[in-house]
Amino acid sequence: MLNYDLTDEQNILRQTIREFAEREVAPVARELDEREEFSVPLTRKMAEVGLFGCFVSEEWGGSSMGYVGYIIAVEELARVDGSTAATVAAGNSLGIGPIYYFGSEEQKKRWLPRLCRGEILAAFGLTEPDAGSDAQASRTAAVLRGDEWVLNGSKIFITNATSAMAGVVTVQAVTDVRPDGRKELSCFLVPAGTPGCTAKAMHGKLMWRSSDTGELFFEDCKVPQANLLGQRGDGFKQMMQTLDGGRLSIAAMGLGGAQGAYELALNYAQQRKQFGMLIGKFQANAFKLATMAMELEAARNMLYKACWLREQHRPFGMVAAMSKLYCSEVFKRVATEAVQIHGGYGLMKEYNVERFFRDQKLLEIGEGTSEIQRIVISRHLGL
């Protein structure tokens, strides 16, 4: 028997995070976006309500709310502001995830409690200037010298890597060449402030303007052997498994953003009058809103199913890719129509729908472009 009901705990979580987002995030989101300012105080407040370490067990300081609960939290933040949701999504799926799932007992003990308390943030160092969709094209290299690994190279578009809260980054690097000519890739934990590691904030973004995005440069950056994450040569596998989970949080951002844009359009259509009547009464606009509501329902069901599969320890990779692809593209369609319903006002920063329209584009590109998601899905189909 199918059961689409959320648990009482999940319903309470949704209400709690929605109230938090409307009380703490909504009043400052536009100003932070305008100034391209990452807010440490706001991030600390998110930590206080348990938004870091969502899927981590209580043993390591997490809130153990499960993946469905985590996705609901990201969804509710994204309903109000994409940048804030990005901080939480990247901080959990990409930052905490690799340490929690692949780290040694010592690495977990060192990093997870502080990360779950929100004292610091973790980042995910995969993308490079010449290695985006082709993640195996990494050029950043790590050489073992004595009891230290020496890293040289660079990373780009790394979320949570340069603010005052940046604590550690998981870095994929080439550690050897295999007999078949393929690169051996391994991952390393590099603490913020390690000599030889320089972080530079990136500005002038179209979207997620109050999220911390940066470049990382490694010049003879030395870390102890103990900072190797998992086994040598497992780096690419670790990164791909991390991205499977990350796709769920990006999908949640698409779903939440689409919900927020839809609500803005619906409210506007019920207030704005033209030709002597509310514009929501015109069939052209009513049909737009009906289509938005239908696609939101479909997107939510697909994403929640993917999260349920993950919680059941069943294969979820294909549905995660489908969810990421579908939710991001639903957000695109909803945000576009929401601006259209607002007319000229939708083009003005005074109206929040403009920010939703900009923030949407990242979701078709980040953590695997829409084109890459279709490749992933087709491979699951055996093509």
Image (cartoon, grey):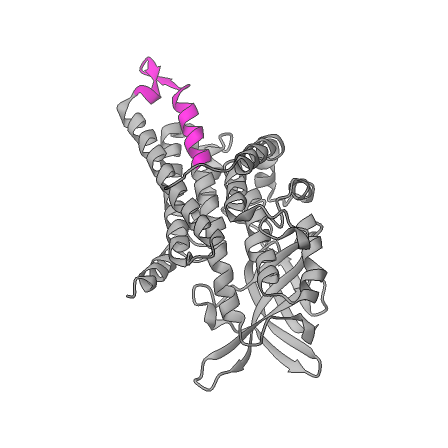
Instruction: Look at 71% across and 61% down and name the residue there.
Output: 109
Question: x, y (%) of residue 207?
Answer: 50, 46
Residue stretch rendered in magenta on the structure? 259-281
146 sits to left or right of 369: right
Quadrant for the N terminus in the image? top left
Residue 259 sits above or below residue 248 on the image: above
318 sits to left or right of 41: left
Quadrant for the C terminus in the image? bottom left
Question: x, y (%) of residue 13?
Answer: 57, 37
Q: Say whether residue 279 is magenta.
A: yes
To which quarter of the image does residue 29 belong? top right
279 sits to left or right of 90: left
Residue farthest top in this picture: 276
Can residue 166 be seen at all in this image of the molecule?
A: no
Question: x, y (%) of residue 119?
Answer: 71, 50
Instruction: Look at 43% across and 47% down and name the residue there.
Output: 361
What kind of secondary structure does the magenta stretch mostly adopt? Answer: helix
